[in-house]
Structures are given as structure tokens and as C-alpha cells.
Image (tube, coloured by chain):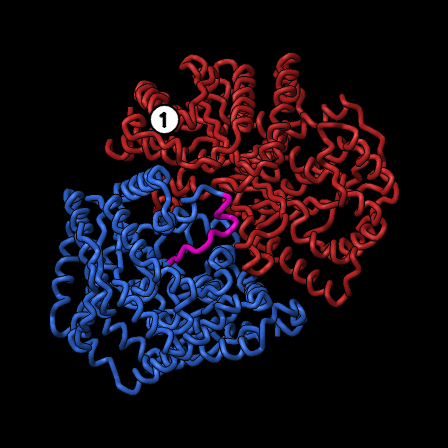
Chain colours: A red, B blue
Amino acid sequence: MPRLPAKSDTERISKSAYRDRADALRVALLEMQVRLRSSSLKAVVLVCGVDGAGKGDVVNVLNHWLDPRWIRSRAFDAPSDEESERPPFWRYWRALPANGQIALFLSAWYSDALRERAAGCEEHWLEPRLERIRRFERMLDADDHCILKFWLHLDKDTQEQRFRAFESDPLQQWRVTESDWVNWARHDRFVEAAEELLEATHTPACPWIVVDSGDARRRDLAVAEALLDAVEGRLIRQAGQSASEPDADRARAAGRASSAKTADAPAVAKLRTLAHQSYQRERDRLQGELNQLHHRARSAGRPLVGVFEGRDAAGKGGAIRRLVPAFDARVLEVVRVGPPSDEELAHHYLWRFWRRLPRAGGVALFDRSWYGRVLVERVEGLIDESAWSRAYQEINDFELQMVEHGTLMLKCWLDVSPEEQARRFGERKRVPYKRWKLTEEDLHNRALWSEYDDAIRDMLERTSTDHAPWVVVPADDKRRARLRVLEAAVQALSDHLDAGSTAEEPLASLPSEAHRNR
Amino acid sequence: MPRLPAKSDTERISKSAYRDRADALRVALLEMQVRLRSSSLKAVVLVCGVDGAGKGDVVNVLNHWLDPRWIRSRAFDAPSDEESERPPFWRYWRALPANGQIALFLSAWYSDALRERAAGCEEHWLEPRLERIRRFERMLDADDHCILKFWLHLDKDTQEQRFRAFESDPLQQWRVTESDWVNWARHDRFVEAAEELLEATHTPACPWIVVDSGDARRRDLAVAEALLDAVEGRLIRQAGQSASEPDADRARAAGRASSAKTADAPAVAKLRTLAHQSYQRERDRLQGELNQLHHRARSAGRPLVGVFEGRDAAGKGGAIRRLVPAFDARVLEVVRVGPPSDEELAHHYLWRFWRRLPRAGGVALFDRSWYGRVLVERVEGLIDESAWSRAYQEINDFELQMVEHGTLMLKCWLDVSPEEQARRFGERKRVPYKRWKLTEEDLHNRALWSEYDDAIRDMLERTSTDHAPWVVVPADDKRRARLRVLEAAVQALSDHLDAGSTAEEPLASLPSEAHRNR
């Protein structure tokens, strides 16, 4: 394996060169993810490295470039009490991705060993732990997990410069703590321990990828390209193994063909024309503001739950993706609500949402939500009238419990016109990498437009409560819709963070039965 | 609703009268559970009441009388940190049963309100909480949850006598704490608060059932009979609602017909002849011994994991049921491992077992387990050879991680001969309430007897490790097998509790690769 570079290369790649590579990469990454999702492969990405090298930034960038609905990010801080009552690897097991998903883990199972080794632990303490790690990774690798292990590196001087730069920026100074400086003083010992650990766990199936993090842009490109190559390669190998199955063959051929297109000028150019100067400026400003509020919410321990509903092609996914960069990906989960799993089907319909509620300071953005009960389930006649008509109050109660607990709530209805929806469906048919988004179901739902009208009206009337009001966002203009969603998020956080946690005065606001069933 | 009795009726029902009623009840309960399992109904049983009335005992009895594989019991002590970071009802939501299951909850969502009211909280604090409870129960009731709320009552004098009796028995004195006596002094205020709460939450759909607990036997019978009636009634109502579906009709007719048989003398007599004096004495002795060890394990915070494997009809379920009475049902889970759910299928095969590992002091008994990987999945060719051959080491690693964490392990292989299996299959065909246990699959597996021979031999050889050895139990004689399993459990606990937690010296015993793959 490559040694850790003694000197970081801090020369910056130009903004335009970066953007060219990034644009092409993002298209390729999204296409890779489409293929990944229909496979039994799971990607586990470990982001390790020295402090200040940007582990969190890399996770944020990947969340932004990829479709976050199939990503789960996790930092592993001090174990919760439920975790510490089980064997140490329990917390990693519970966070492992399902088929087609990508897990982004910070440090994870290397952090203990690294810390202890740098602190001078004995060989006989370390060796069995490394053996455990090797076996764990080998086992996952053998069972269709594609494991990527990144080591983000900085030399001591560059690390110092990075810290100083953070400290001089009021928006970033929270990133440097006293213990960062203590660790910095021990940089040499830490790097020595890291080299030893990387060497010992650099296996053919799960090699380390050392990324010089002297320049953030080069670092992000290097990580994303390595991820793309590794998953693509694994998908091809897997397709090759099951080459006798004609389906897999076709999928593979389709995958490669569309991947080959990623370098084409048109696709890239298309992305470029979408970018609009004033939109970008406003978007960046709002994301920055939201990010500030997010840090306040985190330190106050208040969770954020965002609900995004709208007809097909209303732009829910796009709006969510514009929110993602404002949050620390380590505490963010984007929950894509599709058909329930069989375990979920065997429980009360709200159970699947209760189980996804974020912890203190965490963020969950729901792409579709519990409102499916009074939308699709009502319109399709999956449940009878008594079930969906009592759901309004059940949902209001559910949201009230969150708000009383101190949760910050944001509910956006993205309102698209039938004409614009038709236009977007047409576009999806034409653009190859959007084609997978257009399903039979979308066309079927379109036929039920007026039935949905009733259901939507009832929903907005009966579940727009004081504690969790709906924000209706006109969605025919995508850019304006995205800015409106960002504004609504900023509003929701600033209003309620200033008001203080309602948890101090719990249940006081439980509205009367009569009021809530208006 | 009935007022709480001012004077407890402590007259004891005779042992023989008790046994007659209990025997008939147990058959009826098991039959009810069979029908429940094939329905979309879920039973939620709340066991509340004054200290010393035997809330824990009632949960233990129900676990013993019913098939524990479809029961989940939970006490709600101080919330874990993961729980306290979510709205207060999150912990109840995550414990709600799935279709066909029964949840036994101690106090649960009434404990806070009761304690606070007895301590003199204000009306305006209490009322919204009661309203929340009423709504929650109404919502569950509307969605196929059958809710039973038991209030176990004792008057002040009887409560005192109960405590004194516990204190004078060395095996029971752990049950009385100082705070029990403090609460006892406040008995009147507590009863007043309870009456108020019961009154306020006694709704038509979810009424309270007050059970005079002056005599433990009458108490247990009253609870079990009320549970039987309520679930039976609900199943009939449900069948009536979907009477247009011929399947439901047939199921209902079958259910009632077989239920009608429960009063028949033969079925009850059969149960009686199984009971054999010396077997019973030995069983009770071992259960008592195991119970003592269980309390030591609990206070040491050490989890217990039991694995029960064996061919069809080897008596795994029966052996597990004889272990259940030795454990506190509030920390016990019997995990029946059937086909994986779709969420489980989308993960690594060990993921579904990791997620069921017990917390500190908890007990999980697995009826079938991760060994399915090297048994059914190997024999049926569900996975290729490379997958099952690497599973031996993966399983050894998994178990080692548990043991190093301090988990007490018990692995029993119940060894039944082909002749005895054939006899049991024949019996299942004849006895009506055993018939549901005999499936096509059982007969199919029988045809693969010799393929299983190889798989079983390899499994016992390659996964009998120092840290988690197999106990092979001859199973043709059911009674001897059950005693042997009890002995093995006693042995496993006493050996390792005496040796102290291996967690103090973690990972020291990780055997070399060569040794483990012998």
C-alpha cells in the first residue's frame, strides 16, 4: 500500500477544471446508483483520516452528489447505552446498508484501535482487534458488500494551517476544539500508528485508498472517482458472474451504454444551463443561513423532521437535495417512503415512521410520509373510509407528540399543475438518465387527478395545525420552488429555535377534540 | 367500571380445582393463539396494579401457558438514552406487536401518570396526559389491536402480608425493596389516584378489568380467562366482518369447532398423563436453580443467549417452554426463527440475529437460529458451497464476540431418531390441536434425512468451540431431553458466572485461524 505522504500537496485545482470533472462525475455517480439499487450489492464507505482533513466534508459532498434517499451516513461517537450493552460491533451491524444502498461511515471500527495505538497500547491488545476487523471486512466482502476505505491525509503543517483558517472564520470556528490542538501536537505519533494500522488491514479485498487532502477539491474528486470505479467494477463483476441470466446481461449492457454517455458533452451542458446566477446566489445564501440554524438546533439537542409531499414529478427529490448541503450528513437521514416492508405491513401504519424518528439534534427528511394514508391509500381504496377519516386526527396527534418533545417540524406540499406535470413526464421519456423515474404508476396516478384533488384538499385543511402547519409551495418553477422550500426551512427553524423548546411545557397545547376535527 | 375492592378476598382456590381449570384453559389458550397467528389481530395486554399484587408473576404465567414464541414481554423501566431522545411514546411504539403476536406490557403508559397523581400533581398536568392515552388506545383499537388492561388489586393489609411473606423467604426476599415499604405507607393515596385514573381511561373499547389478587391462583385464572374471552371475541367479530370471504368463514368455523373441543375430557386427560411425578420434581428443582442463577446474571448485567436446534419434531419448542418459567418474563424474549422478512433478506444473513441480541441482563432463546445457514440453506441448495463453508467461521466469530462481551451462551442440539420422528408426525396427524404443526415442509425435510446428516455432523464439528460448545441432547425421550436442557442451562450459567465476565479481558481468547477451522 502507498505510504502516507510526508508532505501534503496543497496546490489547488482551478475552479473551472474542478467543475468540469465534478459535473461529469455527478451524472456518472447518479447513474451508477440507479444500477446499484437494482442489484444485491451494498456499498460501505469508511471515511477515516487525520483531523481537519475533511472527513465530514467528504461525507457531505457524497450526500450532495449522490441521491441521498439511498444513502445512510453515520458517525460513531460515544455508544448509546443500548449499544454499550451489546458486543462492540453491534452498532456497526445495525447500521449496515440493505441491498442497493450506500453507507457512509466516519472512522467506525478503526477509531478505537487508532486512538489506543497512538496512545501506546500493547501489540497483544491490538493484534486480536485487527484480526477481528480483517475478518469482519472479509465476511462482508464475501457477501456482496463493496467496502471502500479512505484515509484522508494531511501533514502536520498543513493541518495547522487548516485549523487556523477555521478559527479565523466565524462560520467555521466551531469546527476546531481544544482537543484538536492536543491531537495536533501528537501528529507524528498518530501518523505512525495510522501507518501501522493501515498496513495491517490493507487486504486484497478491502484495500486502503490514501487521499492527499491538501486541496479540498482534489480530495472530493479523488474520493468520488474511487467510489464510482469500485462500485462500477463490482457491478460488472457481479453481472459477469450471473451472465447466464439474460436479465442481468441486459441490465449490464444498458448500464454500460448509459454510463458511456456520461462523458458526452450534451448531458454535461444540460446540467450547466440549469444553473442560473441569481438562483445560485440566493440558494447558497439560504443554505448558509440554514446551516447556521442547524448548528444551533444540534447544540440545543432538538431534532428536525421535514415532510415533503406532492404529486409525481412535483420535484420533492430535487427540493430535498437542495436542503441536504445545509446539514451535517452525519446526523442526516433522507427517508424515501416507498411500499412498506412486510414487517412494516404487519404493524400499525404509523409504526414505520415512529421507527425512523431522529435522535436529539438529528435530521430526518421524509420523501413522502405518513400522509400516504390519506392520499394514495385513500384514493386507491386500499383502506376503507373509516380508516382514512380517523387518520387525520391520528396524524395530528403524532406530530404534536414530536413538537412537544422539542422536534422542529417542516411540512411542504409541492404543488404542480397538470400541464407542468405532463411536460416533465415528457422530458423524462426523452432524457436517458431520467427515464427510470417514469413508471407505469405515474401515468396511472395521473388518470386519478381529480380524486387526488379531493384528498389533497382534505389533507391540507385537516392537518394544517398550529403545531405543524403545511407550507404550500407552487412547484411549476423548479428553481423558485427550491428556494421557497429553503426559506420555509429557515423560517421553521428560526421561529421555533427562538421560541425555545416547547418540551419545557409539555402537552399544554393539546388542542381540544373539537378544534382538531374541524 | 367496578370500584377497587376495599377488602381483598384471600381465600385460596384448592389446588385440584385450580389445576382442572388451568389445564382446560391452557389448551384453549394455545388454540386461540393458533387462530390469532393467522389473523391480522394483535393483542396488547397491560398488566398494572399495586406493588406485591404479582404483576410480574402474571406475565410469567402467561408466558408459560401460551406459546412464548409469539409473545413479547416488556417492562418499561427508566428510558434508555435512545428512548429519551424521542417523544415519550416512542418506546411503546417500538414494542408494539406485529400481526398475530401478543405483547405483555408492565404498567407501560400508565406508570408516569399514576406516580405523579399519587404524588399530588395538578389536574391540568394530568388531563392532557390522560387524553393522550385515550387517543392512543382508541387508535390502536381501531387498527386491529385487542387491548386488555388489567388492574391487579390488593388492600393495604394484604399487601403488607404479601411483603412480609416475601421477606421471610430467602428465595423471594429480593422482591421487596425499601421503596416498596415507602409506597406501602402511601397505599391509600395511591389507590385514590388509581381509581381516578381508571375511571378516566375506562372506555367502551378499552375497559379496565380489575382483578382481586388476594389469591394468586384465582388471579392467574381470572387474567387468563379474560384474555381468552377478549381475543376469541375479537377474532369472531373480525371473522364476521369479513364473512363474505369464504376463507375467513372456513377459518372461523374451524376455529370454533376445535375450540369447542377444549372442554372435552380426552384432551385434558392427555395433558395429565404426561405429568410424571419424578420428572416434575426434578424439573421444578432445576427451574428453581436456574432461576437463582438468572437473578445473579441479571444483577451482574450479563445477557444470556440460548440456541435450540434440531430436526423437525425434535422438541425444540417443548424444551424452550420448560426453560421459560425460570426466567423473568420481562427480560425474556423467545425468538422463533422462520423465513426472513424482506428487510432481513436485503441484509447480511447475520444481521437479523444481531438485531435480536438481548441487552444487559436480558435473555434471548432462539428456536432455530443462525445455524440455518449451514443446515437448511446448505441442504436445500439456497446458497452455494463457498457461502456455507465460510459460514462456520463467521458464526464462530459472531459467538465469540458475544462471549467476550460477557454473554452467557447455551447451544443445544436436540437429537431425534428417524423412528421417533415418524411416530411424532403420526401423532400430530391424529391430535387435532397438534395438527397445525405438521406441514408439507416437514415431510419434505424427512426425505432429505441423509443430506441433513452430513450438514449436522459438519456443524457440530466445526462450531463446537471452547467459547460456545454444543450440548447434544438425545431427544427421543421428551422428558429426559427437557431435563437435560435444563441441566445444560444450569451448567452454562453456573460455570461462567463463577468464572466471572470474560469481558474484563476482552479478545484475549481469540483463537488462531488454524485452530478454528479445524
Q: Which residues are magenta?
A: B74-85
Q: Residue at x 32, y 32 (%)?
A: A393
User: Residue A228, position in %: x, y?
Assistant: 66, 38
Residue under the image location 32 percent in, 62 percent down: B55
Residue, x 68% and y 38% (percent of image)? A56
Quarter of the figure with residue A25: top right
Quarter of the view holding residue B405: bottom right
Is residue B63 visible in the rendered image? The answer is no
Quarter of the image with the C terminus of chain B is: bottom right
Q: Amino acid at mark 1?
A: Thr
Q: Against B289, is B409 above or below?
A: above
Image location of residue B443, percent across then percent down: 31, 67
Q: Chain of mark 1?
A: A
Number of numbered callouts drawn: 1
User: Disc 1 marks which residue?
Assistant: A463
- Provide residue A213's location: percent of width, then percent of height: 78, 38
Q: Quadrant for residue A354, please give it.
A: top left
Mark 1: which secondary structure? loop
Q: As rendered, which of A494 and B93 lies closer to the eye?
A: A494
